[in-house]
Amino acid sequence: MTDENATKSIPFIGTAITRRTFAKSLVAGALMTPFVNRYVTSASAQGTGVVNFANYGGSYGDAMREVWFEPFEKETGIKVNAGPGASLALAKLQLQNPAGAEWDIIDLTNGGYINAVKQDILLPLDKNLVDTSQLLPNYTGTHGFCYVTFVLAAGWNKTSVSQGPQNWAEFWDRSKFPGKRSLGVVNTAGDAIEVAMLADGVAPKNMYPIDVDRAFKSLEKLGRDNIVWTQSLQEPVQRIGSNETPLGAIYTGRAIMANRNGANIGFSVKQGIVGGDSLGVISNSRNKKEAFRLLNFMATRGDLAAKFAAITSYGMPHKDLESMLPKEAEDVRVALPTNPDLQKNGLISNDAWWADNLASVVARYQEWQLG
């Protein structure tokens, strides 16, 4: 980022759902570009009353359309074209188009947002058009805002573990909780390193810069043979649910959705690791005014943020979200960034630090894995 907010104030943190890898983003961006161009060409002329929004598609994209895009279209008459292909690489490619970007708004990991600001890929947020006063201050920046949050928590199988660990130190305690633990493999994200530091007694406020030597010593205490490394976000649900690993690091959204479908997974967010995704307007957007109007709509509609949280089980950084959350979505309340446990003891992962250090940590991890 180009200012202090870029590296300190914003939790542009991108943990795994959200640390959608830099390498994967580069590949995805390159592969999606021909599709992207065909998808929005008919609506890409400047000032045409549209917003072209690059996101991740799938059921998540369906929720975005239902909760945000359709109400915005009805209220403003501005059409929203949305499609998959969001990545920092895509944003870079857009800047190479002398006629202007095909996409206007891009959904980025918080780490990707930081790099996009550093590289002048995003426009500064027009405060005359975008009111961010209803968002939690730590989630807003000079060029956009974090609009959705995710929490990595200590999870357990409630059938085999009656009362699970309430912090990562207890998660590490093999005498109290026998059996294997599942942790996310350290290749495109480093949350297992943050977990190891928290388990070793490091306070969230003292996490960065990470003492990598200490983190690996903490992993040694747990022991390689007691860790099952997971490659995807769904794996912990399967491994904890089947009791292959009675304990595991799990994203609350995954656990909540699994429990809605009959799983019996418990989790504690008392030392949850908070990550998220951010939105910004590409510098050579052809529909800047319309794009900022959509960002303003998303920043000011706490009622719709509550609806989105209920549908997706993800958090949103709206100040009044908890009071607006529907009764049928009480299970989401614990994972909201306004949760006192997260406010007091949670870790806001520092993507600026990870952007500079992930490669070296991954190399160290791979060396450690070989023993």
Image: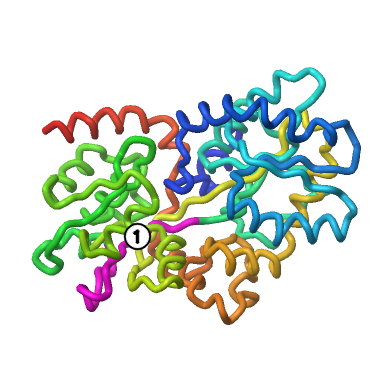
Q: Position of residue 68 (x, y in %)?
A: 72, 58
Q: Is residue 123 above or below residue 238?
A: above
252 in the magenta segment: no
Between residues 263 and 202, which one lies in front from this camera angle?
263
Most foreground residue, 220 or 352: 220
Q: Name the residue furthest left.
A: 175
Q: Residues within 10 Å of mark 1 (few under 14, many from 20)?
A: many
Q: Indicate whether 135 appears above or below 30.
A: below
Q: Is residue 128 visible?
A: no
Where residue 270 sits, quadrant-wise, is bottom left
The image shows residue 215 at horizontal and vertical percentages of 23, 43
Disc 1 is placed on an element classified as helix
Q: Is residue 281 visible?
A: yes
Please state which of residues 31 and 324 is positioned toward the viewer in this rendering. 31
Q: Which residue is mark 1?
A: 237
Where 160 sits versus 273, above or below?
below
153 part of magenta stretch? yes
Seen at 67% across and 40% down, the residue is 54
Residue 156, x across and y down, in percent = 27, 67
Q: Residue at x 53, y 56 (%)?
A: 149
Q: Quadrant of residue 74?
A: bottom right
Measured as percent of width and height from the top left, residue 256 is found at 44, 68
User: 134 or 315: nearer the eye?
Assistant: 315
Where residue 87 sits, quadrant-wise, is: top right
Q: Amino acid at mark 1?
A: Val
Over which residues does the magenta segment extend? 150-167
Q: Is residue 249 found left or right of 89 in the rendered image?
A: left
Instruction: Say left or right for 106 vs 216.
Output: right
